[in-house]
């Protein structure tokens, strides 16, 4: 296997239970080195759970997850933190530290994990903020930013350590059309500029497919389909068609499971 | 029917008891995880200073105001009780002993619980809800080290200092009422305090109580925040639990400490 085709993340026959509920049964995914891999699926199918297992915040109930060749569920706290220094993550809620300014938020990973001199930290932070067009907000507090601006600052913070693996949890959710376009463009540009691997978890079909190099479609606790966006769009699989075209009824039923309708109405 | 009702009750008591013991065990492990982080915090005093400001300095005003009023009430109550026995000259001692032994440690800790304890729980709970704690973990920063332990340490340092302020201002409040308003001799007021208040038996024991309250209340506050369910309702419940459990813990532990300190 050549270096470029080697998987950076291997999810091997992973099962996961949330309480009594089974979220995954035997899911296997290999994320290739470099490029953007988009994991899609309906809300509540466990996409974010998968992301949390990749970064070691959750342990799978069965199976294994390898990141950079390391078995994530077996790592102790020290090794897990060393692994995470090679990753960056952008959260759905942006997760900016509310008591720190924009500048300090972006500088935070550098201050905590490196001994770089203040001058260099300043230059790095300004460069990252410039990349996302937010250099002018460096003195503002997170509460003074709009949703789209916060997300761009969160993106700058996620990339400030030049990570080898970038994780995005629902980066397109809750944005106005302009911010949506900006974030979509930035995810693509930053992945190419940093020559890194990005894993995007989303249920937004249009944006997801527009930036994806590879797509993985999850549903019903299994991997329904995978391939390039073109391959998935050409798929005749009913589950894939229903999700990608937003059909209200199909293999995923419109109705939540319930007892007989007539019986329910007549019941006293 | 009765047997099944009884079985259900026994089952409920059993599961509730197990739940309480399990949560208490988790809380103790959480406290130990915080305490082992204290030595590393010394390397970064700026984080502790920041927290001392949040939990301590911002609680000073209500502590001083409350201390002054409590001292003035003690002045009135003490004077009108003692004057019937011609013992109003002992007013200073009554005020000072009440404050150093009991009212200072207990009331300052209760005020701290309401002002800073609830704020700590809400702040940490909100950080959890908005994924800030998760973001710290993803930036290879331990939230216990960076967020929880500094707040716990700041709380432990703050409460005895607030207690000292409360007691001092309370004695001045008693002086204002007893001496300035009601005519007790100033020299007698201070000399009875000087003669009657024992450094170890009264002042040091009061301070020990205060340190213990500081540990317990801040522990409850940070634990409830960290363990809260990440939703608006979860934070609200956690904040309420901090104030209720913290206040009851102060009163309960005060009884135990008083019994230990003044009986033996």
Image: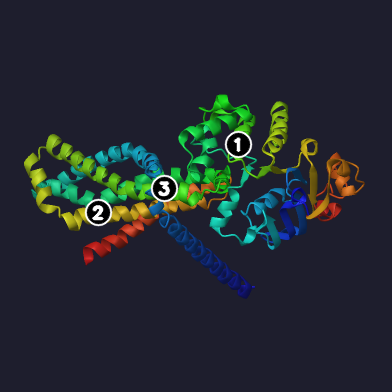
Q: Pointer 3: what residue?
A: B150
Q: Position of residue A134 (x, y in %)?
A: 59, 27
C-alpha span from label 1 to label 2: 48 Å
**How are the residues colored?**
rainbow
> For residue B5, which quarter of the picture?
bottom right
Image quadrant occupied by the C terminus of chain A:
bottom right
Tell me the residue at 69%/48% (across/down): A48
- Tag of residue B206: 2
Image quadrant occupied by the N terminus of chain A:
bottom right
Mark 1 Cα within 10 Å, few/some/many (few <14, many 20+)? Answer: many
Tell me the residue at 70%/38% (across/down): A191
Q: Pointer 1: what residue?
A: A154
Q: Position of residue B202 (x, y in %)?
A: 19, 55
C-alpha span from label 3 to label 1: 25 Å
> Which residue occupies the foreground of this view, B6 or A234?
A234
The residue sitting at the bottom extreme is B3
C-alpha span from label 3 to label 2: 24 Å
Badge 3: chain ID: B
Contact, CB < 8 Å: mark 1 with mark 2? no
Q: Position of residue B259 (x, y in %)?
A: 27, 63
The residue sitting at the right extreme is A236
Q: Is residue A258 above or below residue A113?
A: below
Q: Tell me if residue A260 can be seen.
A: yes
Q: Is residue B47 above or below residue A221?
A: above
Name the secondary structure under disc 1: helix
Mark 3 Cα within 10 Å, few/some/many (few <14, many 20+)? Answer: many
> Which residue occupies the foreground of this view, B75 or B29?
B29
């Amino acid at each position: 296997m050549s270096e470029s085709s080697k998987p950076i993340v291997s999810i091997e026959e992973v099962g996961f239970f949330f309480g009594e509920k089974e979220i995954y049964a035997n899911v296997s995914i290999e994320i290739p080195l470099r490029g953007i891999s988009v994991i899609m699926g309906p809300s509540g199918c466990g996409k974010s759970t998968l992301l949390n297992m990749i970064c070691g915040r959750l342990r799978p109930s069965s199976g294994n997850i390898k990141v950079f060749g390391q078995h994530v569920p077996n790592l102790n706290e020290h090794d897990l933190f060393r692994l995470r220094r090679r990753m960056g993550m952008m959260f759905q809620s942006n997760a900016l530290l509310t008591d720190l300014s924009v500048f300090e938020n972006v500088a935070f990973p550098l201050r905590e994990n490196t001994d770089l001199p203040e001058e260099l930290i300043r230059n790095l932070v300004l460069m990252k903020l410039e990349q996302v067009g937010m250099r002018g907000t460096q003195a503002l507090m997170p509460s003074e930013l709009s949703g789209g601006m916060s997300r761009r600052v969160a993106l700058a913070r996620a990339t400030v350590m030049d990570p080898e693996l970038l994780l995005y949890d629902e980066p397109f959710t809750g944005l106005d059309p302009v911010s949506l376009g900006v974030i979509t463009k930035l995810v693509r540009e930053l992945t190419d500029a940093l020559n890194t691997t990005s894993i995007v978890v989303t249920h937004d079909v249009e944006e997801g497919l527009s930036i994806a190099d590879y797509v993985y479609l999850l549903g019903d606790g299994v991997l329904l389909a995978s391939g390039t966006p073109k391959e998935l769009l050409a798929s005749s699989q009913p589950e894939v068609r229903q999700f990608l075209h937003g059909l209200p009824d199909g293999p995923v039923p419109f109705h939540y499971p319930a007892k007989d309708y007539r019986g329910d109405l007549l019941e006293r | 029917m009765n047997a099944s009702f009884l079985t259900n009750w026994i089952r409920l008591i059993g599961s509730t008891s197990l739940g309480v013991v399990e949560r208490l065990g988790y809380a103790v492990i959480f406290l130990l995880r915080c305490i082992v982080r204290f030595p590393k915090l010394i390397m970064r005093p700026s984080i502790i200073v920041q927290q001392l400001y949040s939990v301590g300095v911002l609680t000073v005003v209500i502590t001083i105001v409350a201390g002054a009023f409590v001292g003035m009430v003690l002045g009135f109550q003490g004077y009108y009780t003692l004057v019937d026995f011609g013992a109003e000259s002992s007013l200073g001692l009554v005020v000072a002993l009440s404050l150093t032994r009991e009212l200072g440690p207990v009331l300052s800790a209760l005020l701290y619980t309401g002002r800073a304890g609830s704020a700590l729980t809400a702040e940490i709970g909100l950080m959890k809800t908005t994924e800030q704690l998760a973001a710290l973990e993803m930036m290879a920063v331990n939230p216990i080290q960076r967020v929880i332990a500094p707040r716990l340490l700041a709380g432990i340092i703050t409460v005895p200092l607030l207690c000292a302020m409360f007691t001092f201002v309370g004695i001045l409040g008693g002086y204002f009422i007893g001496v300035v308003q009601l005519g007790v001799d100033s020299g007698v007021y201070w000399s009875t305090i000087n003669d009657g208040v024992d450094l170890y038996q009264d002042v040091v024991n009061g301070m020990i109580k205060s340190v213990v309250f500081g540990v317990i209340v801040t522990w409850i506050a940070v634990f409830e925040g960290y363990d809260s369910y990440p939703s608006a309702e979860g934070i609200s419940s956690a904040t309420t639990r901090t104030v209720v459990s913290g206040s009851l813990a102060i009163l309960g532990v005060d009884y135990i400490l008083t019994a230990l300190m003044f009986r033996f």
